[in-house]
Image (cartoon, rainbow, N blue to C red):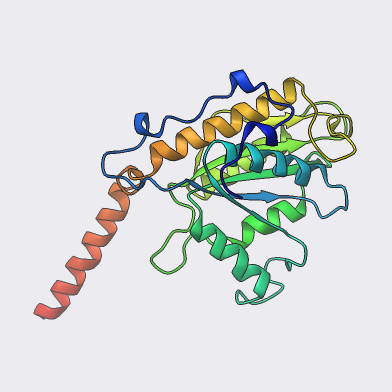
């Protein structure tokens, strides 16, 4: 999915949509390619409202100038139920490595995110050799509910985002009674919920531009520098014995 147009967003108010001013956000000398955003959703139902919401987010992100890819969790094995070279696991990890930001969209089931959502996150390693696939990348979280508005799933995903060392944006979306918010074609209707989704996507793109080019410096830690210095000292001392 590439850059979109207002015609792709029938529920949006065209005059209120504004392109992202990348020049006001990008670090000097940082890359100027379209931000790369990975979208994950937490249901494999035929009419999955988390998938429909993720598709709306993808269209908005494309309009805001992003390159968007969405992972289909169908066929993804349970964590530890297959080897990391399983085709679906490899696909997910490659997309996580490719991305510069993510959107996680989960239904709320029994007061929590779904196992399908958690399994995707669990398959993305915190560290892969010397590389941290998610550290310093941006994250937006959204949920859909079958009943009244709740924030259990987005709150859980925020905790996971922190654990994955991601920069989770302040804004979030929780769509209550999601079955009322989408038309027969699967498009989200105009509403305050839709306006919040637009807000979240716009904010994610802004934060992604802000972080890109600055991520290495912002995630540089004293504890890791001290650990590296200790290891170097030990190696030098061993050689001098």
Q: Position of residue 140 (x, y in %)?
A: 59, 38
Residue at 63% across / 36% down in the picture? 60
Residue 111, image x and y in percent?
A: 80, 38
Query: Viewer-proximal residue, 100 or 32?
Result: 32
Q: Nearer the viewer, residue 5 or 164?
A: 5
Q: Answer with the quarter of the image where residue 156 lies.
A: top right
Please state if 41 lies on the left or on the right of 231 as rendered: right
Which one is in front, 51 or 128?
51
Q: 133 or 79, which is in the foreground?
A: 133
Outermost residue to the left? 240
Q: Residue at x 50, y 59 (%)?
A: 98
Question: In the figure, is residue 230 to the left or right of 55?
Answer: left
Q: Percent x, y for residue 143?
A: 73, 37
Q: Can residue 209 be seen in this view?
A: yes
Q: In the drawing, does residue 32 fall left or right of residue 231?
A: right
Residue 106 sits in quarter: top right
In this rendering, position of residue 25 left or right of residue 232: right
Quadrant assignment, res 190: top right
Is 1 above or below relative to 26? Answer: below
Please report the residue visible at 63 percent of the width from the left and 23 percent of the height from the top: 14
């Amino acid at each position: 999915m590439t850059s979109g147009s207002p015609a792709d967003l029938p529920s949006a108010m065209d005059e209120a949509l504004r392109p992202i001013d990348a020049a006001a956000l990008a670090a000097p000398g940082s890359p100027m390619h379209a931000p790369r955003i990975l979208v994950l959703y937490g249901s494999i139902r035929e009419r999955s409202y988390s998938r429909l919401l993720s598709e709306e987010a993808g269209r908005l992100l494309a309009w805001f100038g992003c390159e968007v890819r969405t992972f289909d969790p169908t066929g993804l094995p349970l964590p530890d139920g297959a080897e990391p070279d399983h085709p679906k696991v490899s696909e997910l990890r490659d997309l996580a490595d490719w991305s510069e930001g993510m959107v996680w969209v989960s239904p709320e089931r029994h007061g929590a995110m779904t196992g399908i959502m958690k399994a995707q996150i669990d398959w993305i390693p915190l560290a892969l050799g010397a590389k941290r696939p998610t550290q310093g990348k941006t994250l937006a979280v959204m949920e859909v509910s079958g009943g009244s508005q709740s924030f259990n799933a987005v709150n859980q995903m925020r905790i996971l985002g922190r654990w994955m060392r991601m920069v989770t944006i302040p804004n979030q979306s929780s769509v209550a009674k999601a079955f009322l918010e989408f038309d027969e074609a699967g498009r989200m209707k105009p509403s305050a919920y839709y306006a919040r989704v637009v807000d979240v996507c716009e904010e994610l793109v802004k934060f992604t531009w802000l972080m890109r080019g600055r991520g290495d410096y912002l995630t540089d830690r004293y504890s890791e520098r001290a650990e590296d210095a200790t290891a170097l000292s030990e190696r030098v001392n061993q050689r001098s014995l």
